[in-house]
Image (tube, rainbow, N blue to C red):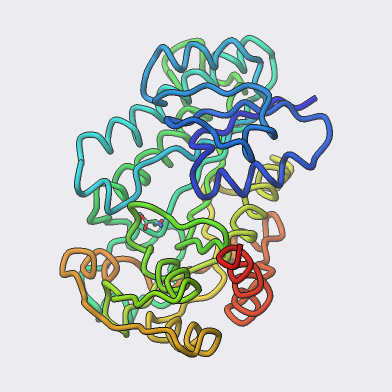
Amino acid sequence: MITTLITGANGEIGHSLLETLSSQPDRKIIALDLAPLGDALARHVHVHVQGDVSDPNVVAQLDQHDIDEIYHLAALLSTSSEKNPEGAHNVNVNGTMGLLMMARRIGTRTGKAVKFLFPSTIAVYGMKSIEEKNNAGAVTEFEHLQPTTMYGINKVYCEQLGAYMSDRFGQLTDERGAKVLDFRALRFPGLISATTVPTGGTSDYAPEMIHAAAQGKAYACFVRPDARIPFMAMPDGVKALLDLAAAPMENLTQRVYNIGAFSPSAEEIAVKVKSAFPSAEITYAPHPQRQAIVDSWCGDVNDSAARRDWGWTPDFDMERAFNEYLMPIISQVYAG
Ligand code: SER
């Protein structure tokens, strides 16, 4: 029996991850979310804790379980974080620190390293100009790490915090060297789900455009037609989390991995949406601050380390993402 904690279980990745994990035998799932779980999700879950990940009383409840692996998905995304930077720091950083400490306690208690899967983001990159972005091409994990957003800063710090907590925690004390925590992070591109829409992100224009068209609603895109960042279909995001979790520790040469799938401009997404929904009405009304955030993110990622170390390869390029995942499912979602 594997005991798995999912924080932010009600969020977009949480939904898809829960559905996938629920089909696996011998798994006890503990779900944490601020909000109650809907019936569809609740039936996959053995223990539901409702509360804030940064609340020590909530962590104390979770700590009662001998957890084997944690998917720490709870976070405020980039646009929400700019609206509430202090709140973002509390959830994204203090919440993560509390869970890392809990994971160390559990690992020490059970004698088994707790796997800690952490979704990081392309928001950790910070391009100073469009020229720098265009010249950078597909960036590796170690370049252009000068984020311009609270969210990006929180995530790049927590990547390093997770590595520290796994490898060097208390390096002047006896606690060093105990293999009680095994932190692994993925830098996600913008994720696009057929069944849910994100809230509070800055890559949201792509899923918003697609879901608006599927509902016959006009959409004013908040970035310019030429804005370009990497995106991925949600099933590939979940696959990446599970594949990284399953990778033998000795194969991993780094704790943080880029993963890529496709990197369209907003206009290229709009063209694809209009070919699937010919009556879609898409206009552009760039929001200066959100445009600046997207301009600061990389245009593409180099994911060769993930491909080499744990066999990462996306199932969905843009064609397949639209034709075989998004369009067939999204039409059903709104037809119902
Ligand atoms: N989807 C995230 C956001 O827009 C970026 O990883 O905040």
In the figure, 189 relative to 85: above or below? Answer: below
> Is residue 321 depicted above or below 15 in this figure?
below
Residue depicted at 47% across the width and 71% down the height: 215
Q: Position of residue 221 (x, y in %)?
A: 30, 75
Q: Quadrant of residue 45?
A: top right
Quarter the N terminus occupies: top right
Of residue 24 and residue 71, the one placed in the foreground of this image is 24
Image location of residue 62, percent across then percent down = 54, 17
- Quarter occupied by the C terminus: bottom right
Q: Which x, y percent locates residue 207?
A: 45, 67
Q: Residue at x 58, y 59 (%)?
A: 234
326 and 332: which one is in front? 332
Is 147 in front, or is 17?
Answer: 17
Q: In the image, what residue occupies the spot 55% across and 13% down?
A: 63
Identify which residue is drawn at 65% across, 78% down: 320
Most distant residue in the left direction: 288
The image position of residue 293, as x and y in percent, is: 25, 64
Of all residues, the one furthest to the right in this rendering is 25
Q: Is residue 194 left or right of residue 8?
A: right
Q: Quadrant of residue 51?
A: top left
Q: Looking at the image, in which quadrant does ligand 1 appear?
A: bottom left
Compared across the picture, whether 29 is left or right of 164 comes to right
Instruction: Depth check: give the residue in front, 64 or 247.
Output: 64
